[in-house]
Image (cartoon, grey):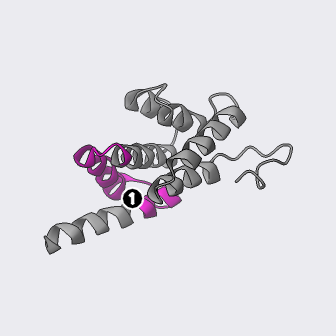
């Protein structure tokens, strides 16, 4: 991510959000934190998805994050990132509620919708296997 985002004028936070969660999924909390700190230093004001970075840094609450959304795409993203973060914290029931919301109500035109549906399918299969 550092090579991709060291160019002047690069402002997209989405690849950094993906990298943050990917590092956590692979057990690399150190690089996840480095990525989150890099995203924080390079975000531009409160323009979406900057509030997601603030939420992941635990500077704002879930309700605060949801209050920043201004479209169905952003609401889908917010619920997905809340669900992913809650999964990291081990709060699986709460995480699944947000991911299920996305699967049922989210905007299918954004990547996060597909991600949430895949995670819900994974959870459903795991429940049946048990």
Instruction: Point out the image quarter for the N terminus.
Output: bottom right
Could you classify mark 1 by the number of other residues whose Cα lies within 10 Å: few (under 14), some (14-19), or many (20 or more)? many
Magenta residues, start to end: 88-115
Q: Where is residue 81 in the image (x, y as percent from the top left)?
A: 45, 46
In front: 11, or 110?
11
Q: In this view, does 115 lie to the left or right of 130?
A: right
What residue sits 55% from the left and 49% below the top?
20
Residue 110 drawn in magenta? yes
Q: Residue 102 at x, y = what percent?
A: 36, 53
Establish if 12 lies above or below 112. Answer: above
Residue 46, how many percent across, how many down? Answer: 62, 29
In front here: 21 or 62? 21
Q: In which quarter of the image is the C terminus?
A: bottom left
Residue at mark 1: 116
**Which residue lies at the image location 33% right of the left edge and 53% below the top edge?**
99
Q: Point out residue 73 in the picture as x, y percentages from the top left corner.
A: 50, 49
Instruction: Give the farthest residue toward the right.
Output: 8
Up the image or down, 60 lies above or below 26; here it is above
In terms of secondary structure, what is the magenta stretch mainly? helix
Secondary element under disc 1, as helix, strand or loop, is: helix
């Amino acid at each position: 991510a550092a090579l991709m985002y060291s160019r002047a004028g690069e402002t997209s936070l989405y690849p950094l959000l993906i990298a943050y969660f990917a590092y956590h999924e692979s057990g690399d909390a150190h690089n996840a934190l480095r990525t989150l700190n890099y995203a924080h230093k390079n975000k531009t004001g409160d323009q979406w998805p900057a509030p997601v970075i603030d939420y992941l840094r635990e500077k704002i609450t879930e309700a605060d994050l949801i209050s920043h959304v201004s479209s169905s795409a952003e609401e889908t993203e917010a619920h997905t990132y809340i669900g992913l973060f809650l999964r990291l914290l081990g709060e699986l029931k709460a995480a699944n509620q947000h991911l299920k919301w996305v699967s049922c109500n989210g905007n299918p035109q954004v990547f996060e919708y597909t991600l949430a549906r895949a995670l819900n399918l994974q959870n459903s299969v795991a429940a049946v296997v048990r």
